[in-house]
Amino acid sequence: VVARNKLSIKEKLEFMKSYLEEGKEFDFEDLMVADGEQSRENTVITFISLLELAKWQKVKIFKNEKLSK
């Protein structure tokens, strides 16, 4: 039997609300490293949660021109 730790968008949203600070900028990688979980599932959940926060106008998302190719 393989136990699987399920991540939830609700839990990730709560984490992000407590982690993010008003007026500060963060890279997506900062959010990935902040909770210590670096898996494909966590990346997807973090991205979806970030999009939800943007939809609710709680965060602003922009492309970092320095990293573009």
Image: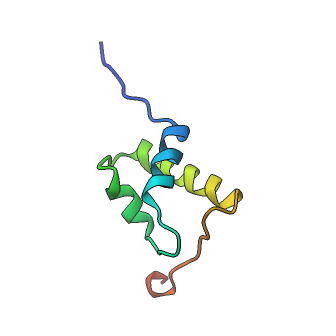
Q: Quadrant of residue 34?
A: bottom left
What residue is shown at x 53% (from left), y 47% (from top)? Answer: 13
What residue is shown at x 70% (from left), y 58% (from top)? Answer: 55
Above or below 11: residue 31: below
Above or below 23: residue 69: below
Of 9 and 3, the residue lying toward us = 9
The residue lying furthest to the top in this view is 1
How far across and down, in percent of the image, does residue 63 sit?
56, 77
How far across and down, in percent of the image, does residue 29 sit?
38, 64
Of 63 and 57, the residue lying toward us = 57
- Colour scheme: rainbow
Tell me the quadrant of the picture where the N terminus can be found.
top left
What residue is shown at x 56% (from left), y 56% (from top)? Answer: 50
How far across and down, in percent of the image, does residue 10 sit?
55, 39
What residue is shown at x 58% (from left), y 76% (from top)? Answer: 62
Above or below 54: residue 42: above
